[in-house]
Image: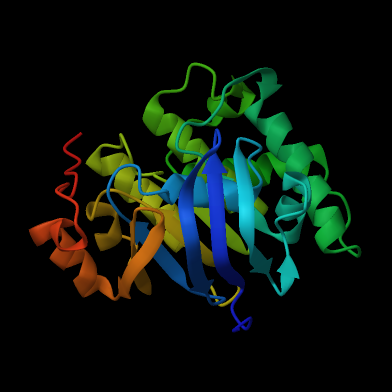
Amino acid sequence: MLIDSLLSVFNLHIAVEGKEVVHGLNLQVPEGEIHAIMGPNGSGKSTLVNTLMGHPKYEVLAGSALFDREEILEKEPSDRAIAGMFLAFQYPKEIAGVSLRSFLFAAYNAQMAVRDASQKIISPIKFKKFLEEKMQELSMDPSFAERSLNQGFSGGEKKKAEVLQMSILKPRLALLDETDSGLDIDALKIVSDGVNRLRAPHFSAIIVTHYTRILSYIKPDTIHVMVQGKIVESGGYELAEELEREGYKKYGSNEGITLDIT
């Protein structure tokens, strides 16, 4: 059993509302690598990443998931976040009355205080400057920092806000659940650039996507095909090109690759 990867998943079984949707999944994500998971609708891709982050909707029936050699499936979501995991939601939630700046200021200080005990809590003034620099990189209007989290944001603005959070919190493992869905070409490039700026030896990511387009901007080290709750094939970028041409028919699915034309 290999545990040298940053994330090691073994024989994972997951149920949603009493129905098993992930069946004995195995996955290895080494530190410093970006992996993409593709597959037909209902194959369990989003279920997997939400479970890894501790979403209470999903029930782990069996299996193990090691993050940095420690079992995470029994940990609270907050403990997983402090350890360096991050989930960019497919449908980001709105939180009325909590500004984006206040939310990120509290999250940043809470996480950094645990990760590095020698680091001082950043002042509100320094954090404001830090936040504005990150927002500029994502072509976000600075006024959004004072608005309630995701409230009144367009779909693209919500996805940018998710990548902004990731840029601020600097996770060791980012789980991106269809972050590219609904983005026009300009927003997709900006979001992709935000992810690429984080690429480093101590940063890993799993990109869940229906589309091959984002993979031309964020080149993954490995692509996994997930069908009926299992990873059935893994390969390089050429696998994404094959899927775009032929869809998933060789895996017993008639669904083709979804083309994002927004």
Residue at the image point whose x is 67% and y is 24% from the top: 99
Q: Position of residue 188 (x, y in %)?
A: 31, 45
In this figure, which colouring scheme has been used for the structure? rainbow
Q: Which of 36 and 65 is in front in this view?
A: 65
Tell me: residue 222, above or below residue 122. Answer: below
Q: Which of 220 and 187 is in front in this view?
A: 220
Q: Where is residue 159 in the image (x, y as percent from the top left)?
A: 44, 37
Tell me: residue 34, above or below residue 23. Answer: below
Q: Where is residue 41 in the image (x, y as percent from the top left)?
A: 30, 43
Left or right? Give the position of 146 relative to 259.
right
Q: Nearer the viewer, residue 30 or 162?
A: 30
Q: In which quarter of the image is residue 34?
A: bottom left
Residue at the image point whose x is 25% and y is 61% from the top: 216
* Residue sticking out furthest to the left: 245
Residue at the image point whose x is 50% and y is 69% from the top: 26
Q: In which quarter of the image is residue 248?
A: bottom left
Left or right? Give the position of 167 relative to 261.
right
Q: Can residue 170 be seen in this view?
A: no
Q: Can residue 187 be seen in this view?
A: yes
Left or right? Give the position of 124 relative to 153.
right
Q: Quadrant of the N terminus?
A: bottom right
For the image, the number of numbered tags is 0
Q: Position of residue 257 (x, y in %)?
A: 18, 50
Q: Quadrant of the C terminus?
A: top left
Residue at the image point whose x is 67% and y is 68% from the top: 66
